[in-house]
Image (cartoon, coloured by chain):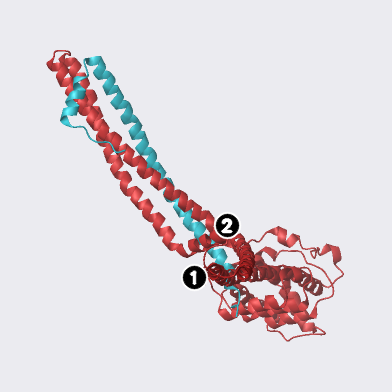
Amino acid sequence: MAYERMTPKAIEDAAARIKDLSELDAFIDGIESELEQTATGIVDCRREVGTLASRLDQADADFRNAGSEVIEMWKDVPPRE
Amino acid sequence: MALEADKADASPAFKTAEASDSVKPAESRFSQGIRWLRTKSGEGLAALGKKYDRWQASRAADHTIRQNGRDINTVHSEIEGIDIQTIGKPVEEVMALRQRQSDLMSRLSVLTQDRQQAAGVLSNYYGEKIERPMKEAEACEAAITGLRERRDRIQQTLDKARDHFNIANTALSRLRQEGKCTDAERAERITRLQKIAERIQDCTSQLDLLNPELSKTQQQLSAVRTKHRDKITFAQSLRSMREDGTHGTLAAPRAKEETTVEKSPDAAKAIASEAGSSGSASETLGSVSDADIASIVGLYSRVLGGLPSALRRLLDRFSGQKEIRESQPTDELVDQWNELLDMPPKTSEISKIDKQRLVAMQSKMDLFEFGMALSLKLDTKQEEISNGMLKLAEQMTAKSDERLAA
């Protein structure tokens, strides 16, 4: 389910629930932790995309090789008729 | 091309000069070469035979699939037609029609089994080889889909972080207004929030880079699939037929998609017909007749091509080899060889001058190397072998002539 951005009112209300500095610090800790994971996730995604490119190169080569074997089999033979 | 010492050393025909000095070098070396050639030609014929058998089997399977595809359709129609025919018919007729329907169902079952078996034959030959990259492409597609979902989740997390940043910022302002924090405490939180803002911005930039990378990978996947569409369709057809006997006729990928086919159709026919005329690999392996060898030698002598570096390496490799001794040369092969060397054919006796030429010639190249090269490259680039053979033979003949003249 897609996340919906909060309205200014909702932000005000949420901010009002933070009563003191210790609660604010805990809240900020949470944001930092989540962002840390997010940054790691993005790096992982980008690395995986790079891996996919290599895998697709290999698949392309395997297709070519498989094709060569097929062609190899057909090329030296006379027509059926 | 492999030029392992093992291939040469494995030949039982190898003996050292010290072992049989009394035997004439020219005859023994020649005869050894002939024996070696005979063995290796057998293996070469085996390779050709295997290829031919494989082709026949796959063509037969292809034919089965095409033919019984039509039969299955016909039987299907008839089975369905019987249901209509039974309406309003007397019991006896209905029973007869049902029996006919039952027979047709049995026939359909047999046809389907045949089709599955035929698909299995083709699948064993190359369907699985195509399926491997096909599955890899499917896995890549799933991974791309997964990455897109992860990207969307990360985007949402960043949106959420922005909201949380605003909440924290608003809360901090309120706490300051309410006198619940000092300026120094506020400044410390502002610094943390600034770092959070920078982090959000950095993540957003990184995420923006991920999008085109994903699109590019998706395009790469599409390109691979488009490029090999025929093969994929082919493998998918095989898979369907192998599994349940369904799917239409088979469209095997043909030579049109490859540019590496160097042989002319006539040459290809010649190879196939010669391989076919001498029987299958299993029949010829180990009992190669002189006619078989002659057919191969003749085949190669008819085909022209470029000078093979492989032959040159062979010459270099064996130029320092000890003499190989054996008696009883095989005249037919000597004839073939002489013919290749543009020498007068000799069937019953070799003239003195020819013997001398052979002795001179064998120091660099003889039937041994010829046979080895022939065998190693038998079913690939035949033009190179034959043309290289002819060129080298000319060179060696010229050299032996020079020696004789000297």
Chain under label 2? B
Q: How many marks?
A: 2
Disc 2 element: helix
Q: Is residue B349 left or right of residue B226?
A: right
Q: Residues within 10 Å of mark 1 (few under 14, many from 20)?
A: few
Chain under label 1? B
State whether residue B98 is above or below residue B352. above
Q: Residue at 53%, 72% (x, y): give it.
A: B261
Q: Residues within 10 Å of mark 2 (few under 14, many from 20)?
A: some
Label 2 sits on residue: B243
- A13, B366: nearer the viewer: A13
Q: Mark 2 or 1, which is nearer the eye? A: 2
Task: Specify the colour of chain A.
Answer: cyan
Residue A30: image quadrant is top left
- B224, B360: nearer the viewer: B224
- B338, A22: nearer the viewer: A22
Q: Is residue B24 left or right of residue B366?
A: right
Q: Which mark is residue B259?
A: 1
Residue B384: image quadrant is bottom right
Q: Is residue B337 visible?
A: no
